[in-house]
Amino acid sequence: MGLLSVVAVYGSGTKLSNGHLPAAYLVAIIAMLFTAHSYGRMARYVPVTGSAYAYTARGFGPSIGFLTGWAMLLDYLFMPMVNFMLCGLYVNSLFAGIPVWAGTLGCMVLVAIFSVIGVAWVGRMNAFVAAASILVVITFVTLAVLNAPAVDLHTVLQPALPSDAGFGPIFAAAAVVAFAFLGFDGVSTLAEETKEPQKNIPRGVILATLGAGLCYFLFSLAGSLIMPDWTQIQNVDAAGTELMQKAGGDTLMVVFVVVNVLGLILCGTAAQMSVSRVLFAMGRDGLMPKALATLHPRFKTPYVAAGLVTLLCITALFLTLDQAVYMINFGALIAFAMVNLSAVKSLYVDRKLRGGMGTLRNLVMPLIGFAFVAWLWTQLSLLSFALGLAWLAVGVIVLVVRKRSGAQVHLALDDEPAPAAEQRLETSLI
């Protein structure tokens, strides 16, 4: 998840919301914060690789966990695809002689190499790109306000409030722009490679969601000021270049493309590492072939799983951006819903963490998060449901075949806090 990922769905989100994209982001921020809270709660008690798969498997058993992980694979498999596709689009916007497919393929090869090398360098590079992204966003927002046709209370509030059509378009757009938040859950997939995961994973999940959400809201609000008539957008898939050029001319547009391409490579690497680690966890637990749990002898990364993801990502050369985004949101929203339910089942029901703020943290907030996500899920297109349900059907077949083959399932519980320590953890951490 990069700060500039808001531009990936700016055009389609603005169209769906009928020019009220900031309002859609406010809805998405609320929904994602409740869900991020559930991820953080589960990360404290299940600090192992696997994210939604690991949490659901421990709450509802390996079979439901597998199907949740299978749905989540749509998120993680298509996320790097979207990054590769956007990279190709933006490279083509600067260098028209380079076909979109060539830029997409080049980004794919780079990410394949980086995902095997490991996570250490990603953090250092991400800090630089994050700082550059913040500067680009600040510059864009400033220039958009200064160069906007009109800036008054009405023009600022109008896109942040529902239109005459009500909340329908807002919720429909919120279900799509939730794509921009994807990645906060990826933090939890690296639990076994993080220092003090019980403390740092929950904090990182919440801060990443809140910080990115506010940035997205400001960006979309500035976009509505500099281009109040959203029908002027000529290329919906690469709307960011048009916004930047309108606000700050060619210079800002070029800087934006360069920073965004770097960010897309990093986000693609993070996404590919996340899905490879989910496959690693499922292979280790016996729900997928054991070969996926093979680590590189030098880099200690799941290189077999990473290689499989790269092969699957080649399909990005034959998909549209909208198709990839729809598939991501279907799988991601299922995973988010199940993590909210798993927080209730694992923490409130099974572990009986109900004292003090326990009921609020482990029951009320996860159920609110589930309700928000369930509503957003109903706003997705029929195409999303058709393809997503077909994917789940394949997952059921895989699960049945694995069970009939006699595969042994073992859930790793490394570093899970002992019951005696859970109440101390509950009262000592926010």
Image (tube, rainbow, N blue to C red):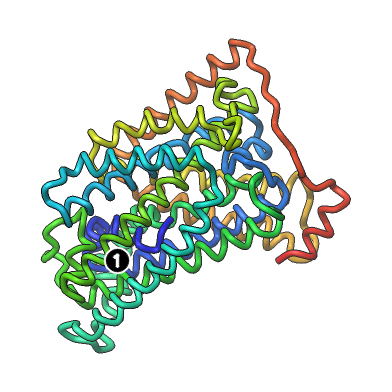
**Residue sitting nearer the eye, 408 or 403:** 408
Q: Is residue 360 left or right of residue 395?
A: right
The vertical placement of 367 against 71, above or below, is below
Instruction: Locate residue 219, reporting x and y percent.
Output: 32, 71
Left or right for 402, reference 20: right
Question: How many numbered marks does the figure carry?
Answer: 1
Pointer 1: residues within 10 angstroms few (<14), some, or many (20+)?
Answer: many
Inspect this view and state whether residue 44 appears.
Answer: yes
Quarter-wise, where is residue 416 in the image?
Answer: top right
Amino acid, disc 1: Leu
Q: Position of residue 96 (x, y in %)?
A: 12, 51
Query: Is the residue 226 above or below the residue 32 in the image?
Result: below
Q: Position of residue 260 (x, y in %)?
A: 32, 59
- Decide which of 72, 316 is in the foreground and name it: 316
Name the residue tied to disc 1: 21
Q: Residue at x 17, y 73 (%)?
A: 227
Image quadrant holding the C terminus, namely bottom right
- Residue at (29, 82) in percent of width and height: 142
Front position in the image: 110 or 26: 110
Could you tell whether 147 is left or right of 274 in the image?
Answer: left
The quadrant holding residue 245 is bottom left
Name the residue at 63% across, 56% down.
201
Which residue extends farthest right? 420
Residue 68 in view here: no
- Residue sitting at 29 percent across and 56 percent down? 9
Tell which residue pokes out farthest to the top in this image. Answer: 405
